[in-house]
Amino acid sequence: MGDVDPISRGDKVYLDTAYVCVRWESGGRFLFVEWKEWADSPEYRAAHEAILGAIREHHAARLLIDALHARVISDEDQRWLGAEWIPRAVAAGRRWTAIVMPSSALVKTIVENIDNRAPNTATETRYFDSVTGARAWLSTVG
């Protein structure tokens, strides 16, 4: 949260709640997702549907997910994400994802395992300790 840029002209906020913020960052031409705290299953899935809508609208190949404050994701939501959502996101254009890793060791493991559950795709995911590092990598792809 400390190195998140302010919203600028051309950016578009898709969802801003107590648990997540989803916005298009026009300057970097990527979708920025900041998990702020725990979301229950309907909230978690609704957030991902908002992300998918933004990917489609902007033909967004690049995502930056700040999961530093993310909380545990249920097994059922992990399976849904890997089996259903990720393939739809890839079909919509997602190619590169930079993830700022959670501070919780348990959630870190969950985040790393989600991509392993997804069907084999032509995407690349990299893990970072900061939003700054994630931004820097995204600026080199696509």
Image: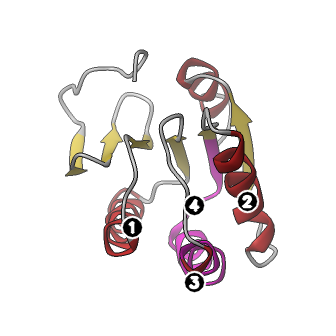
User: Looking at numbered disc 3 in the image, what kind of residue is underneath it?
Assistant: Glu
Q: In the image, is residue 12 above or below residue 88?
A: above
> Which class describes the residues within 10 Å of circle 3: few (<14), some (14-19), or many (20+)?
some
| Residue at mark 3 to residue at mark 2: CA–CA distance | 15 Å
User: Looking at numbered disc 1 in the image, what kind of residue is underneath it?
Assistant: Arg
| Residue at mark 4 to residue at mark 3: CA–CA distance | 14 Å
Q: Nearest the camera: 21 or 96? A: 21
Q: Residue 18 at x, y = what percent?
A: 23, 46
Residue corresponding to mark 4: 94
User: Looking at numbered disc 4 in the image, what kind of residue is underneath it?
Assistant: Arg
Q: Is residue 128 magenta?
A: no
Please tell me which residue is depicted at 17% across the width and 28% down the height of the picture: 9
| Residue at mark 3 to residue at mark 1: CA–CA distance | 16 Å
Residue corresponding to mark 3: 84
Q: Which of marks 1 and 2 is nearer the N terminus?
A: 1
Residue corresponding to mark 2: 123
Number of on-image labels: 4
Quadrant hosting residue 91: bottom right
Asked which secondary structure carries label 4, the reply is loop
Q: Which of marks 3 and 2 is nearer the N terminus?
A: 3
Q: Residue 24 at x, y = what percent?
A: 33, 44
Please tell me which residue is depicted at 39% across the width and 24% down the height of the picture: 1
Range covered by the magenta-colored residues: 77-98
Quadrant hosting residue 74: bottom right
Q: Is the magenta stretch mostly helix, strand or loop?
A: helix
Q: Earlier in the sequence, mark 3 or mark 1?
A: 1
Asked which secondary structure carries label 2, the reply is loop
Residue corresponding to mark 1: 56
